[in-house]
Image (spheres, rainbow, N blue to C red):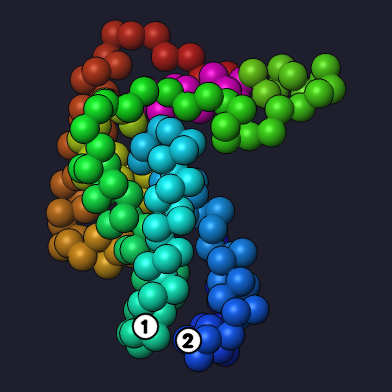
Amino acid sequence: MQDISKDTIAQAQMGDIDAFEKIYNVTSGFVYSLSLRMTSNKEDAEEITQDVFLKIHKSLKRFEFRSSFKTWVYRIAVNTAINFSRRVSKKKADTVKYDDTVDTAEEKDTMRDAHEKEHNEKLIQSMLGILNPDQRLCMILRNIEGLSYEEIAETLKVNINTVRTRLKRAREKLISHFHGKEVICR
C-alpha cells in the first residue's frame, strides 16, 4: 500500500471528496485483498470493503496522526473482517475461485502461468483454512501483506509476544497438518 500524504488526509478530513477518492484508490486494493483472504468469498469481501470505507469516511475526522495512516486503515479493515466473520453463521468454502481474484489471460502462453497461480492460491487458501481466525490473520498480515511484528501488534492492538505466539502456533499447526503429505508448489 502506498503512503498517503498528510495533506491529502487533512483535506479528506475537511470533507474534500477528491482527497477521499485518492485515499480510496490507494487503500481499496489492500482492503479487498485482506477481506477476500479472511472470508474466501468475493461477495463477502466486497461487502466488507464497503463497510470499511463507510467506517473510514465516518471516522476520518478523528484520525489524529498518532499512528501511521496505513496502520489505522489495517486496524479498521481487520476489525471489520473479524466482526463480519463472526456474524456469518454458515461456514464459508475453503477455496476462492481463481476468476474472482485475478483476471484470466487469453493467450495460450500465459494459461500455464494462470493455472499455476490458481493452484497456488487454492493451496494458500486451504492452508489458511486450517488456522483459527487469530492465527490466520497474523499469517496474512505477516506473510502475505509483509507487515513487521510491531506493525501487526499495533494493528491488532495486542502485545508483540502475542503476535509471535500466534505465528509460532500457526506454523506448528501447518507443519503438523502437512507432515508426511506431499504439497506441491509449482
Residue range (magenta): 116-127
In the image, 62 versus 181, the foreground residue is 62
Q: Which residue is mark 2?
A: 13
Q: Is residue 110 left or right of residue 1?
A: right
Helix, strand or loop at disc 2?
A: helix
Give me the residue at 15% from left, 54% from top.
162
Q: Position of residue 143 (x, y in %)?
A: 41, 44
On the question of residue 138 being in view, the answer is no
Give me the residue at 46% from left, 56% from top.
50
Give me the residue at 74% from left, 19% from top.
111
Q: Is residue 183 left or right of residue 84?
A: right
Q: Position of residue 147 (x, y in %)?
A: 40, 57
Q: Are marks 2 and 1 in contact (CB under 8 Å)?
A: yes
Q: Is residue 112 left or right of residue 77?
A: right
Give me the residue at 21% from left, 43% from top.
86
Q: Is residue 30 left or right of residue 83?
A: right
Say if 144 sits above or below 26 in the image: above
Q: Position of residue 16 (x, y in %)?
A: 58, 85
Helix, strand or loop at disc 1?
A: loop
Image quarter of residue 136: top left
In the image, 160 versus 154, the foreground residue is 154
Q: CA distance from mark 2 to mark 1?
A: 8 Å
- The mark closer to the camera, 2 or 1, is 2
Q: Which residue is mark 1?
A: 63
User: Magenta span has 86?
Assistant: no
Image quarter of residue 51: bottom left
Amino acid tagged 2: Gln
